[in-house]
Image (tube, coloured by chain):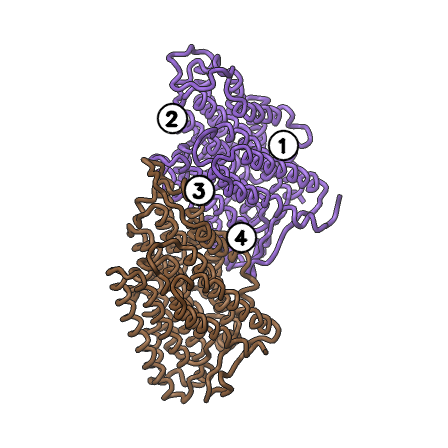
Amino acid sequence: MSGGEALSWLLVVPLLAAIATLLAPGRWRGWGSLAALPLLWLAFTPVLAAFLHQGTLTTPLGGWSPPLGIALIGDGLALGLVGLTLGVFSLCALFAAADPDPEDHSHLWPLAWFLIAALNGIWLSGDVFNLYVGLELLGLAAVGLVALKGSAEALAAAMRYLLAALLGSLAYLIGVALLYAAAGSLALADLAQLDGGDTTVRVALALMAVGLMLKTALFPLHGWLPAAHGGALPAVSALLSALVVKASFIILLRLWLALDADPLAVVAAQAIGLLGAGAVFWGGWMAWRQARLKYLVAYSTVAQIGYLFLFFPLITGTGTDAARLAWDGTLLMLFAHALAKAGMFLAAGNLVRAVGSAQIADLAGVGRFRPLSLLSFGIAGVSIMGLPPSGGFTAKWLLLQSALASGQWPWLIVLMGGGLLSAVYVFKVLRHAFVEGPTRDTFRSPPTAAELAALTLALSSLVLGVAAHGLLALMRPDALSAVLEGAG
Amino acid sequence: MSGWSPVNAWLPLIVVGTSLVAAAGIFLLKEHRHGLRTVFNLSAAVIKLGLVIWMALGVLDEVAFETRYVLVDGVSFILRADPLGIMFTGLSSLLWLFTTIYAIGYLEDAPNRSRFFGFFSLCVASTVGIALAGNLFTFFLFYELLTLSTYPLVVHRGTEKAMRAGKVYLAYTLGGGAVLLLGVAGLHALVGEIEFAAGAGLRDLDTALNPVLTLIFVLLVIGLGVKAALLPLHGWLPTAMVAPAPVSALLHAVAVVKAGAFGIVRVVYDVFGIEFTWQLGLLQPLAWLACATILYGSIRALWQTDLKRRLAYSTISQVSYIVLGTALFGPVGTVGGLVHLLHQGLMKITLFFCAGNYAETLGVHRIDELDGTGRRMPATSVAFTLGAFGMIGVPPLAGFVTKWYLGIGALDTGMAWVIAVLVASSLLNAAYFLPILHRIWFRPQRAPWPDEHFRDCRDTHPWLLLPTLATATFSLAAGLLAGMPFSPLYWAEVVVLREYLP
């Protein structure tokens, strides 16, 4: 089996696992899923090996090559993201399987497997319609996961999320239809031949961009996110914040790189960057204002997403150096945030379980009783704050260098100010946890496996800060070279 | 022992790593594993000190110790042992050993000891990383790690007051860190990666860039000045005195403030180069700032009634001697500044140990409660007296050596007014230390001790007393034996000869 054919197994394994867990009785689903995880890694290993050996992999599904058929494309970016997905999902699954929650949440498993299938599909897709299918499946699985808790609050959050997701997909789908009318092809690679100044293309792109921003929860379209991410089960929140919002971002990024430069693109990029800046400050401010721990972490996601969108002003119409730094910095930010935020949500879940309350003010004394969970939260916080040594810091450094190289001073303020603001809300949690006061003595212990899952994710976000060189080199795409030539 | 070997390429990383491994091990220990934690702590400190001595001897023989790898494109992670770095590393690892012993005695039966010692080790790892960093990026990495790992120690007691102090501490240090990052990133964008080396390539740049370079210098000094407690960025230091005594002793007398002062030395000598800094006209303002801080700290110290707070203001004043020495354009002044990096560390840690001894043994915190302590705690009081006389600069103690070199250096540079500042500062030092000594030795005890412990010890608990006496002895020896090989003065001269007088 060649590496290219192995690509499809990255979709088949999670789909099979989803169906199997759906059919299995509830109590078998968690442990069965853990048993299926090695299969997923087993499918990934030959793909990675083949990629390192021969470069980008392509599989025409069913033997039909594009533009008639649809293809899976495993470039460096896609495989990096698949690896990230597998890593985060494995630890979240460990956390969820170890969860002693008395309520039955076993529907989590089939939904989570569908989610993983959708994510892998999105990472590996090379055409805009496949991406739409992936987005739709992803949205439905994510909404199902949010609704899992069954409380009135969870259902309301899921309903809002569903509306946002559907609206976003709809806007995206209209854009796809318009693009097809203009280009006669759905493959990303063919879109480059489109005339960037064409009105149809502009409208199509604008619709797709707005739809994707809604799904990524970019300020001011973030309203659905805090309740959905803050109210879900910890493992679900972790998956949603770490991976799901990134999917629509990556689609936008791929579209942006695929399309030929439009004279209006610079203006659009600056506007998107401004929204990103708004997200950084508004998300940070709202995170600080929260009284509930998981809502604080959810608003932190709103803020961190803002950094990702600085990609557009930093890469559009700037020089080669700035563009390369922006690419590296944005992807590193995405990876660091995924690992740190997943770790932070899991740690927050452990802390909430330990004190039996969702309120930050009730954390007093938890530092003494669950030091490991608090430490995981703090370590993840280091990366979220963008302080060294962490992936978040190295990413911030690259973005700073990119902003300096392209002479775009205002983004410096966003990067620095956002970092300080995030320190304010992260330390708000730590401060409450360090208080030694009238201590409570009724702490519950989260399972060791759950604590270790959080710690592993948090630590890996630190390690990423000093070991990113190889990963970034792997993910630097041919598409970027094309953009750089255009810019140069 | 010469040339390059694989071991030498790893040694700097291993020296930093010993404390990291110790920290990880201690974090994983259960709270009640007192004995095992002590073994961990002490063996890590002893191993580290041994490795540092080994490296120091190698550096004298001009052996290269360097760890480096590419972090991301255009940025390297570099740890390297040069004479200046080894000087600071040696100081930190020596004092870490003593402070660890002291802290074990001090925190007996206190809660959260695993957390305390874990972060304590992390602090030392950061300090050594700062000392051995081979470029600004690596320096910044450890500089911020130091901020993060000291916060839990400042708020260690978990009281309302400690939390407030922690907030102030973070506001200053994270804000300073952000400014420093701007400076580091700006310089990197301008000239690419710069490794620490005397007379770095900045002066060959287009003179049109001078205003930008001046701005970057100012950003760097502000960022570093927060930790060095330069006026007006010193506000966090007295507040942070709520931390336990070992924290005040090691961190606020040595690690944190020194990290700032050391950074300024690096920026002036190894990034901009002293001559180029002079050409930019930045040395003079730096000297004024240092002098203002020296006088301000001493004057504020006069009015403090709390012993630790008075020592804190004294630290603000004394650390600026290092900055002053750096700002004097000439080799002798440089020697004065560098030697004070070590001298101030030895003397101030002794004084803080003593303050901790008084507080732990007798419950004495305020200066007016010190009456008659000399009789109850003679050994501690002798140590305190040595430290205080050293700070005043009484010959032949360590502080005198510093002030002597600074004075000569100032005359060499034609900045005679600095002498006046030194004299005024010495008078002020005397004015705030002598009344304390008077109370300790010549006044009778006024009232029962506020909170007496260790009644069966002649002075105080041996774990507290031994480190105090050891550092007092070192600070005495540093002055008396200043002319001998391996004294602080010897090292300072090696640094200056090797690096700045090629």
Give the residue pinned by disc 4.
B137
| Residue type at tag 2 | Gln
Q: Residue at x 42, y 15 (%)?
A: B371
Relative image position of residue A253 (x, y in whole percent)? 42, 72
Residue A114: which quarter of the image?
bottom left
| Residue type at tag 4 | Phe
Q: Nearer the viewer, mark 1 or mark 2?
A: 2
Indicate which disc, 2 or 3, sits on the residue closer to the N terminus: 3
Q: Depth check: A468 or B392 in front? A: A468
Give how far apart the Cα atoms at labels 2 and 3 are: 22 Å
User: Could you tell me if the residues under marks 3 and 4 are in contact, i.e. CB atoms within 8 Å?
Assistant: no
| Residue type at tag 3 | Val
**Which mark is drawn over residue B226?**
3
Give how far apart the Cα atoms at labels 1 and 4 are: 29 Å
Q: Determine the secondary structure under disc 3.
A: helix
Label 1 Cα neighbours within 10 Å, binned few <14 / some 14-19 / many ≥20: many
Residue A441 vertical placement versus B9 (above, below): above
The image shows a total of numbered marks equal to 4
Q: Determine the secondary structure under disc 4.
A: helix
Indicate which disc, 1 or 4, sits on the residue closer to the N terminus: 4
Label 2 Cα neighbours within 10 Å, binned few <14 / some 14-19 / many ≥20: some
Give the residue pinned by disc 2.
B304
Give how far apart the Cα atoms at labels 1 and 2 are: 32 Å
Q: Which chain is purple?
A: B
| Residue type at tag 1 | Leu
**Which corner quadrant holds the N terminus of chain A?**
bottom right
Tell which residue pokes out farthest to the top in this image.
B444
Give how far apart the Cα atoms at labels 4 and 2 are: 39 Å
Indicate which disc, 3 or 4, sits on the residue closer to the N terminus: 4
Relative image position of residue A150 (x, y in whole percent)? 28, 61
Label 1: chain? B
Give the residue pinned by disc 1.
B489
